[in-house]
Amino acid sequence: MESLNKRLGWKAAATVYLRLAVGIGYLSAVADRFGVWGPPGTHMVAWGNFHAFTGYTAQLNPWLPASWAFIVAWIATICETVFGIGLIVGLGTRLVAFLSGLLALAFAVGMVFGSGVKAPLNYSVFSVSAGSFLLACSGDFPYSLDSLRKRRKALRRQSGD
């Protein structure tokens, strides 16, 4: 299996696929809350606007004062945007993947308390969290800005700069 993995580059392909899947997933969720996928009530649209997302944020955080929902919604949105872009381009991948895993885990826990255990299972939020943590444990991030920076640094060391 090891030689097959080396020959086909499955680990590299899986790492890139995971980065793209989680990153695009985050950006899609952000797009949804700004109406990119359609207004509220449109088929396959979760929120459709930021107001609906803020209400959902309050539902998932029943232990917080309702006045905090807007701030928490913005923090989540900023994190998802930064993590989505970071994972797609592969910049700071290990840290971004770890923080992504924490964010998804916090979201899953909020879903359990705000909507019940079936909601995070239906939306694979635990899987996104686990995948992010696994990605953070990866030793290499092919086809990423991280790998490009690593190669350039190695070339500079070889040339004596």
Image: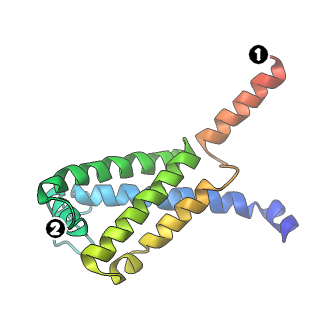
**Distance of label 2 from label 1 (alpha carbons):** 56 Å
Instruction: Give the mark toward the camera: 2 or 1.
Output: 1
Dividing the picture into quarters, in which one does residue 149 lie?
top right
Q: Position of residue 29 (x, y in %)?
A: 33, 60
- The residue closer to the viewer here, 112 or 86, is 112
Confirm whether residue 90 shows in the render. Answer: no
Q: Position of residue 83 (x, y in %)?
A: 44, 49
- The residue closer to the viewer here, 49 or 113, is 113
Q: Position of residue 13 (x, y in %)?
A: 67, 60
- At a point 18% along the width and 64% down the height, the residue shown is 58
Left or right for 98, reference 37: right
- At a point 66% along the width and 55% down the height, the residue shown is 138
Confirm whether residue 64 shows in the render. Answer: yes
Furthest-top residue in this view: 161
Q: How many marks?
A: 2
| Residue 161: image tag | 1
Looking at the rendered structure, the secondary structure element under dot 2 is loop
